[in-house]
Image: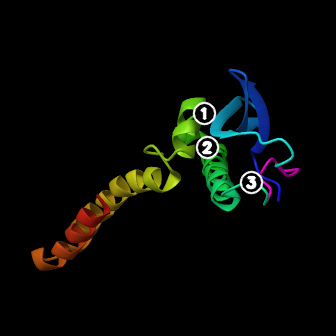
Amino acid sequence: MKTASELKIFKSNGYEYIYIYYKQNCLIRINTRYTLVKNGMTKENLYKSTVPDYKKKNDHIILMKQRVDKYISDRLLNNSQLGEINQEEAHNAAFNHNPVNSDQVDNKLLIPIFCKYISNLNAEYNYQASTMKYYNNLKGCLE
């Protein structure tokens, strides 16, 4: 399956680590903190079944890669709203340290639109307070 990032091996401090690597209009290299095992890696740079706890390690690496891919695709699709792709935010997304995703940004954009809608409804139809209570409750849930 074609994804935005890929897994590559890089040397750091005498060890070889598996990195999540992306290079299109910017360079992102995120250390997964898993080391290379000689004769224990697949072609996709995941662990073979000969490595102890290979399923757990592979699942964790794949999850981190999926988070980075989601971060990259969100940034590419919503570039004007979210800003440019950067290394630090991609690292936070990979290790799930308060990632900013498109759902949170969309929610922040929805509240002003909904408030404007409520004010237009009230001005046009002059709803009673009991009817407006439902709209205000919904606005509170969105915030």
Whether residue 80 sits left or right of residue 142 in the image: it is: right
Query: What is the number of callouts on the image?
Result: 3
Q: Quadrant of the C terminus?
A: bottom left
Q: As shown in the figure, which amino acid type bears the numbered disc 3? A: Val
Q: Nearer the viewer, mark 1 or mark 3?
A: 3
Q: How is the image coloured?
A: rainbow
Q: Are marks 3 and 2 in contact (CB under 8 Å)?
A: no
User: Which residue lies under the disc numbered 2?
Assistant: 75
**Up/down of 42 relative to 79, above or below:** below
**95 is within the stretch colored magenta:** no
Could you say where residue 17 lies in the image, as x and y percent from the top left?
A: 71, 35
The dominant secondary structure in magenta is loop
Circle 1 is placed at which residue position?
84
Q: Which mark is residue 51?
A: 3
Q: Which residues are magenta?
A: 41-48
Q: Nearer the viewer, residue 124 or 38?
A: 38
Q: Residue at image x 31%, y 62%?
A: 142
Which is more N-terminal, label 2 or label 1?
Answer: 2
The residue drawn where x is 53% and y is 41% is 82
Amino acid type at mark 1: Glu
